[in-house]
Image: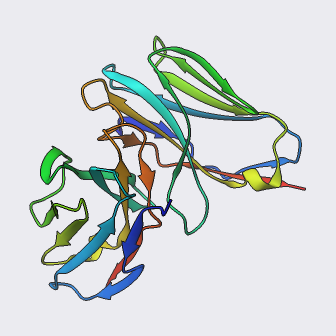
Amino acid sequence: QKEVEQDPGPLSVPEGAIVSLNCTYSNSAFQYFMWYRQYSRKGPELLMYTYSSGNKEDGRFTAQVDKSSKYISLFIRDSQPSDSATYLCAMSEIYTGFQKLVFGTGTRLLVSP
Amino acid sequence: KAGVTQTPRYLIKTRGQQVTLSCSPISGHRSVSWYQQTPGQGLQFLFEYFSETQRNKGNFPGRFSGRQFSNSRSEMNVSTLELGDSALYLCASSSQGDEQFFGPGTRLTVL
């Protein structure tokens, strides 16, 4: 079983929809939780990160971490066609910080106009 | 500010050969990490170098090695290539171990 599980999708939604992306994990030592976006033929880019539990909002994006359930989510409000990409969750332990990330396999999101 | 650059972008090799990939980090960044991305396994951490020293290592066989030079540029080497080594190899740099910035990757195909 992988340390981080993520539904590969694809997830298809109409423009303007609220998108919910999720990951589950098994390693209770994970303290940093990140979401990356990867467009085709590009490297991943960091969208948001949270440390430990709680919520974090940045524009149309909200990240949630529930450590008791070992479950993290990324919500995208008012989704746009330009949001079509693969979304990767990533996690790491406190002593490695942003390094030695453990990634989910990614969820492919398609937002249709 | 220039981003992370990786060369070459595409590479085709045959089984048993070796390959060297190069990564130039963002100017001023001293940490360079390498990841392997495949459809089945996703991104997997290979190793991280900071100031020419390997600081973290993933669970890959010894055929995968790397190094970092005094100008922070990094290379990774894969010896005795196997078909399963076909993947996108991503390099990421960071300043002090904080947010990582990824390059576009090198697509390696092993025939």
A77 or A67: nearer the viewer:
A77
Residue that protrudes farthest toward the left in the picture: B62
Residue A83: percent from the left, percent from the top? 73, 50
Residue located 34% across and 73% down the image: B86
Residue located 28% across and 72% down the image: B22
Residue A24: percent from the left, percent from the top? 48, 29
Q: Quadrant of the C terminus of chain B?
A: bottom left
Q: Look at the picture and state if A53 lies above or below A111.
A: above
- The way the protein has been coloured in the rendering is rainbow
Q: Is residue B111 visible?
A: no
State left or right for residue A5 relative to residue B72. right
Residue located 9% across and 61% down the image: B62
Q: How many marks?
A: 0
B53 or A111: nearer the viewer:
B53
Q: Look at the picture and state if A27 lies above or below B69.
A: above
Residue A3: percent from the left, percent from the top? 35, 35
Residue B34 sits in which quadrant?
Answer: bottom left
B18 or A51: nearer the viewer:
A51
Residue A91: percent from the left, percent from the top? 40, 33
Q: Is residue A47 visible?
A: yes
Residue located 37% across and 69% down the image: B87
Residue B67 sits in which quadrant?
Answer: bottom left
State left or right for residue B110 relative to residue B4. left
